[in-house]
Image: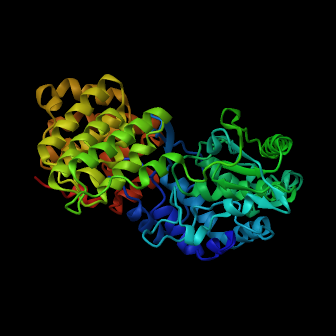
């Protein structure tokens, strides 16, 4: 079985850099219209370093599986490149740190999501689970050292990434005492990493951005050091990013683990989420119970295909479980599973109608629509248009800019006119301009650009061009993606103008090249 550091050793410094910068720049669950590959190529040919100064970032709300938004961030590209470069240039030292923290472990404490992927250029993938590579240490932890473990302790770090203190990076690497004596020495690599991380957050030392994959590497530097301390105290657990599952023999030990975990977290200024702590008496099922209920469903009919009644029952059960448990990751699972099955034509039509309805009810599922609903079930354009106009109107009423953005993206992707724009263009564009939501502004600008045959001087684009000029003057970094794409090189300054002159765009070519 591979050890923690084995996964890290499989990634070269250059692969790390490319994976983080070209394929780990944008959060995964946002509109599929962006790419950082051209920016990576631009950085490869640079003859000078980007400037050393603070910069803010784009903040965005992305719906979670409990239908509550999570704040994520798109960093200033120049600042993010510097973070990725520091990680690349010191990758050997970082891997030595990981070895030091994990070498004595008789199993992999951190179920690491950083690894070379077989099906992607990314080096980080959420919910990655491969039992052939990762094993199942939970089974070995049930009985250990002549003791039967009778309790499972579940714990969680509260708002993990936003709570990480950048100064704690040196603490984790060389210890708090040494790092404080050398804090002003910017020639030390771990201090440089600390500095570029805070540069990316406008000089703030508290918080890593949720979304960029570099945050996952940096968090592991700190969390593996905590793992090392807890492991030496005799605790045996599995950590999935910031979630802990610890197996203990007594209730007293369970309570002691929570106290020790909180103490170790406090050493790095990290808060424990007491609302998510639980001490559970064993035995319990290792896999989530709802997965057992759904794993053998839906069953094939006499035709050898999944038929209408069986599929309908499966969807009903999925919805009931999701509502009962308050977790719409269950419906996410159901949609992906059905998309991979062989269905009768009637079952396909059922799946399309029911899943489209669920997507309209729960914006968390919108990121699945194109790949797992529209394409596999051959949804017609009119149905996509109806869905888009519905989520646009409802999103507008609820100030849900993510839903509105998806509606406009579908209109671009499938080449139709959104009815709300058709009947009252002025009112709707005013609403979007006043929203000041960066992604909504960009996708709307692309929509009208396409409707006007890519004429950037069209009347419908004037409001967006004016807004971009204003935002560039007063708040460029929090709206950099919109300002950069809309404005010409003559209306941009410094590094932005130089990059524009090199014809770098963060919008996917296939989207820009969709002509009527």
Does 423 sit left or right of 394 as displayed? left
Q: Quadrant of the N terminus?
A: bottom right
Asked if 444 appears above or below 39 in the picture, the reply is above
Left or right: residue 390 compared with residue 253: left
Residue 497 in view of the camera: yes
Identify the residue at horizontal 60%, vertical 58% (top origin): 83
Residue 274: % across, % down: 71, 34
- Counting labels gives 0
Is 49 positioned to the left or the right of 261 in the image?
left
**Residue 452 in view, yes or no:** no
Image quadrant assignment for residue 232: bottom right
Q: Residue at x 55, y 53 (%)?
A: 79
In this figure, which colouring scheme has been used for the structure?
rainbow
* Residue 181 coordinates in the image, percent (x, y): 88, 53
Query: Residue 216: image x %, image y %?
Result: 60, 56
Of 285 and 247, the residue lying toward us: 285
Using the image as rendered, state which of residue 461 and residue 224 is in the foreground: 224
Establish if 77 lies above or below 91: above
434 left or right, relative to 411 = right
Where is residue 428, by image quadrant?
top left
x 38%, y 41%: residue: 317
């Amino acid at each position: 079985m591979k050890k923690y550091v084995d996964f890290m050793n499989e990634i070269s410094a250059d692969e790390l850099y490319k994976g983080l910068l070209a394929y780990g720049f944008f959060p995964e669950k946002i509109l599929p219209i962006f790419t950082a590959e051209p920016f990576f190529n631009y950085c490869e040919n640079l003859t000078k370093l980007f400037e050393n100064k603070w910069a803010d970032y784009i903040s965005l709300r992305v719906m979670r599986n409990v239908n509550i938004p999570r704040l994520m961030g798109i960093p200033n590209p120049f600042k993010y490149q510097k973070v990725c470069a520091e990680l690349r240039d010191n990758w050997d030292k970082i891997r030595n740190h990981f070895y030091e923290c994990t070498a004595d472990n008789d199993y992999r404490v951190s179920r690491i999501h950083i690894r070379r992927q077989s099906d992607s250029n990314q080096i980080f993938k959420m919910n990655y689970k491969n039992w052939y590579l990762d094993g199942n240490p939970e089974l070995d932890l049930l009985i250990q050292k002549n003791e039967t473990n009778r309790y499972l302790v579940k714990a969680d770090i509260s708002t993990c990434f936003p709570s990480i203190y950048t100064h704690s990076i040196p603490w984790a690497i060389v210890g708090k005492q040494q790092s404080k004596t050398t804090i002003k020495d910017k020639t030390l690599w771990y201090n440089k990493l600390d500095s570029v991380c805070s540069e990316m957050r406008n000089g703030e030392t508290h918080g890593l951005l949720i979304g960029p994959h570099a945050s996952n590497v940096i968090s592991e530097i700190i969390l593996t050091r905590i793992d090392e301390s807890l492991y030496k105290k005799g605790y045996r657990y599995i950590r999935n990013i910031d979630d802990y599952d610890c197996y203990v023999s007594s209730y007293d030990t369970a309570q002691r683990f929570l106290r020790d975990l909180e103490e170790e977290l406090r050493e790095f200024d990290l808060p424990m989420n007491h609302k998510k702590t639980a001490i559970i008496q064993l035995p319990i099922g290792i896999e989530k119970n709802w997965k057992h209920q759904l794993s053998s469903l839906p069953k094939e009919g006499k035709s050898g295909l999944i038929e209408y009644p069986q599929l309908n029952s499966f969807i009903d059960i999925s919805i009931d479980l999701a509502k009962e448990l308050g977790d719409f990751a269950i419906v996410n699972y159901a949609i992906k599973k059905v998309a991979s099955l062989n269905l009768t034509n009637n079952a396909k039509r059922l799946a399309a109608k029911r899943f489209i309805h669920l997507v309209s009810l729960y914006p968390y599922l919108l990121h699945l629509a194109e790949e797992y609903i529209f394409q596999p079930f051959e949804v017609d354009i009119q149905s996509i248009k109806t869905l888009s106009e519905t989520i646009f109107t409802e999103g507008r009423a609820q100030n849900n800019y993510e839903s509105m953005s998806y509606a406009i993206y579908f209109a671009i992707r499938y080449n139709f006119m959104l009815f709300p724009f058709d009947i009252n263009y002025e009112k709707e564009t005013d609403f979007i301009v006043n929203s000041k939501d960066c992604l909504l502004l960009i996708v709307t600008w692309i929509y009208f650009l396409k409707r006007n045959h890519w004429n950037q001087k069209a009347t419908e684009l004037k409001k967006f061009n004016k807004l971009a000029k204003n935002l560039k003057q007063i708040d460029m970094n929090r709206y950099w993606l919109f300002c950069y794409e809309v404005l010409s090189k003559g209306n941009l300054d410094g590094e932005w103008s130089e990059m524009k002159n090199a014809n770098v765009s963060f919008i996917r070519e296939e989207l820009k090249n969709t002509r009527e």
